Amino acid sequence: MYCPDEGAYHLRVSLHLYDTATRSLRAFQPARSGTVSIYECGATVQGAPHLGHIRGAVNFDVLRRWLEHDGTDVLHVRNVTDIDDKVLAKAAAADRPWWEWASTHEREFLDAYETLGCLPASISPRATGHITQMIELMQRLIDRGHAYAANGDVYFAVASFPEYGALSGQKLDEVVQGESAATGKRDPRDFTLWKGAKPGEPSWPTPWGPGRPGWHLECSAMSTYYLGPEFDIHGGGLDLVFPHHENEQAQSRAAGDAFSRYWMHWSWVTMSGEKMSKSLGNVMSIPAMLTKARAVELRYYLVGPHYRSTIEYSDTALDEAVTAYGRIENFVQRVVQQTGSVEPGVLCADFTAAMDDDLSTPSALAAVHSTVREGNVALDNGDQDGARGAAGSVRAMMDVLGLDPLSDRWSRSSTADNSMQQALDVLVGHLLEERQRARAERDFATADLLRDRLSKAGVTDNLGPELMQWVLDRVTCRVGNVRLSRTCQIISGQQPPTRRIISRKSSGLTTSQHPQ
């Protein structure tokens, strides 16, 4: 739908979001006007990301872009679960140190987020950097009578919290946690906050004995540490509603925190009717997907369906998304070729209404395609002003979705440079991992050989136990630890802008300034 005058654009209706807790569409009201706080359950870095993982990150990226479009300040925390049963098991099976295994796959997730055009999270905390906060939370729960220690483990007493089950709709007498049998539990419905130390596993000291955190505890501690006792939105995949998010809410509220005001959950990507899952072996990796479509086309494919609807993957559906994005891209490029540059305009009312209706991206994209059709007609009729206005509106709408075809990220003129930067970053990163591994195994001859090869290519590295850093032409790239971006901007002789980097210390995060 081409909007012929500015009055037809951007008729704003208040944002409504589907809240899992109330099972209803609710008007969104943040706790503080002008600021929205979001906690996104990030990756358990047990392996490489697949399409199902990245769908969630893209969904939250669209939400964030929509909120920021009106000038809202968004504080977006996306955690990294770097200690977990699966991480330990897979690292052991590969005969790799658990921390190296986790760091390698964390980097793959961050690469995938960036490749698909996701804005970097404000903070990306690792679970292992927040043991102090977890201990403090457990102590509060014990003091309030909601948790207890037994045989080196610490458990949450489900029966002590009558509200348990409110998020997922579980009845208390029907709760099954799905955890392995534990002799220290007073009630089989209780869930683990802290796991006592086992031979060969990493552990941290606590007043109840050494051990490592349980999954649910990690997210409660990190979310409230960065966002406060009450924050606006907590989200994740539909499979996290129970037990993970139910347990998070229970332990946080039992400790006295209001916790999340809204709960958002996105649906799955399936293949042949089954959820895409490593355990089923039906996953599509991001590198594999990028042999079928450009990154921007893959993002369009993920953005197109509503976030609460299941995506049944097929090559045919992906091809349809590629064709649909091509129609938008070709229209904008056609206008540029015939009329000159096109700046982003204002949003069509139908697009705004769709986005305010629980991020209804199918309807939002329908508004985009309608505007494209009207713009093509205007161009064919020689109405260059009308065509330019339509193209500007298309750019603005697609920018909200992270899909603007003329943006620096997605324009075809910058694709080769972006691909080269990403390839260099991956190649250097792999060499640094090999060098780090050789040093850990005291194979100094191999480590020195790799250092010399990197040096001949103009790369200087700085390796530490928790950080890999490399420099090329005065440009700093960080690999490992928690950071906002990893891809090098290779501009010879030009100092890049300073960017805020999150660096992990023993029990929390500190911020420092480093070149990008």
Image (cartoon, grey):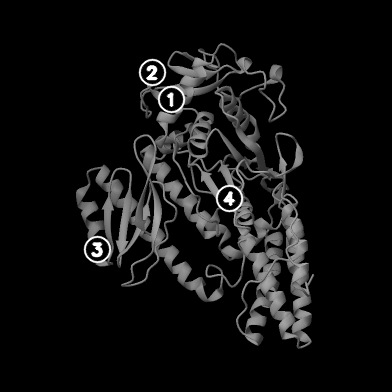
In the picture, the disc for residue 135 is: 1
Q: Which residue is mark 2?
A: 207
Q: Confirm or deny contact between disc 4 and disc 2 (CB under 8 A).
A: no
Name the residue rendered at 63%, 18% in the picture.
161
Question: Mark 4 vs mark 1: which is more N-terminal?
Answer: 4
In the picture, the disc for residue 455 is: 3
Image-quadrant location for residue 216? top right
Q: Confirm or deny contact between disc 1 and disc 2 (CB under 8 A).
A: yes
Task: Specify the quadrant that holds the C terminus.
Answer: bottom left
* Residue 119, image x, y percentages: 53, 56
Disc 2, SS:
loop
Question: Mark 1 vs mark 2: which is more N-terminal?
Answer: 1
Q: Amino acid at mark 3?
A: Ser
Q: Which residue is mark 4?
A: 57
Name the residue rendered at 52%, 54% in the picture.
113
* Residue 505, image x, y percentages: 34, 39
* Residue 32, image x, y percentages: 60, 43
Give the distance between the C-alpha atoms of the residues marked 1 and 2, in whole angstroms. Answer: 8 Å
